[in-house]
Amino acid sequence: MAGRFFDQWAIGDVLEHEIRRTVTETDNLLFTTMTHNPQPLHLDVEAAKASEFGQILVNGTFTFALMIGLSVGDTTLGSLVANLGYDKLIMPSPVFIGDTLRVTSEVVGLKESKSRPNAGIVTFLHRCINQRDQIVCQCERSALLKKSA
């Protein structure tokens, strides 16, 4: 198990996740079509060329899902009871096909569970960063985690 239990976290802990991911055209196309998102900026090269970006934009919900996925192995794998919510989601910079993304996670909150004495809530601030060191996605994730003992 790679994740940590509730009582193994401290506010201010920061992780730089080792796994990085280069976004491909196939990633964007499959995710966009699987989620029935007809936005031309994600699917139509000519429409995207005519936009202010001049190229296909990667689907933002793919970027969000990838950010969370890249963080799971180090944060909640094996210790998660449930994800309770995602808050303050922002996407301040676009993602393009060929961008390589990495993720950092910081613990910004810890709270004992009132209803489950064997678990607690960890709030993570996840940041997804491209190869130009721009934040492309960020959110807070509240996760109910098991305690180690």
Image (cartoon, rainbow, N blue to C red):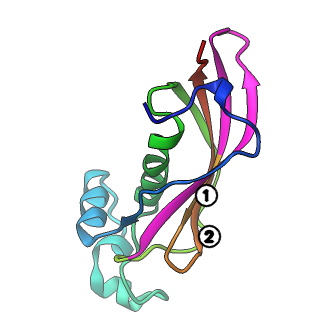
Q: Between residues 125 and 75, which one lies in front from this camera angle? A: 75
Report the quarter where the N terminus lies.
Answer: top left
* Magenta-colored stretch includes residue 118: yes
Tag 2's secondary structure? loop
Q: In this view, does 63 lie above or below 114?
A: below
Q: Callout 1: 10 Å neighbours few (<14), some, many (20+)? A: many
Disc 1: which residue? 138
Alpha carbon separation for disc pair 1 and 2 = 8 Å
* Numbered tag placed on residue 67 in the rendering: none
Residue located 26% across and 52% down the image:
34
Q: How far across and how far down the image is residue 145, in percent?
A: 58, 24
Horizontally, residue 43 falls left or right of residue 141, namely left
* Magenta-colored stretch includes residue 15: no
Residue located 46% across and 62% down the image:
60
* Numbered tag placed on residue 92 in the rendering: 2
Q: Which amino acid lies under the numbered mark 2 shown in the image of this protein? A: Pro
Does label 1 or label 2 sit earlier along the sequence?
A: 2
Q: How far across and how far down the image is residue 17, in percent?
A: 51, 54
Residue located 64% across and 26% down the image:
6
Horizontally, residue 124 falls left or right of residue 76, namely right
Horizontally, residue 19 falls left or right of residue 135, namely left
Horizontally, residue 124 falls left or right of residue 33, namely right
Q: Between residues 43 and 91, which one lies in front from this camera angle? A: 91
Quarter of the image for residue 56 reads bottom left
Q: Callout 2: 10 Å neighbours few (<14), some, many (20+)? A: few
Which region of the structure is painted magenta?
A: 99-124
Q: Which amino acid lies under the numbered mark 1 shown in the image of this protein? A: Gln
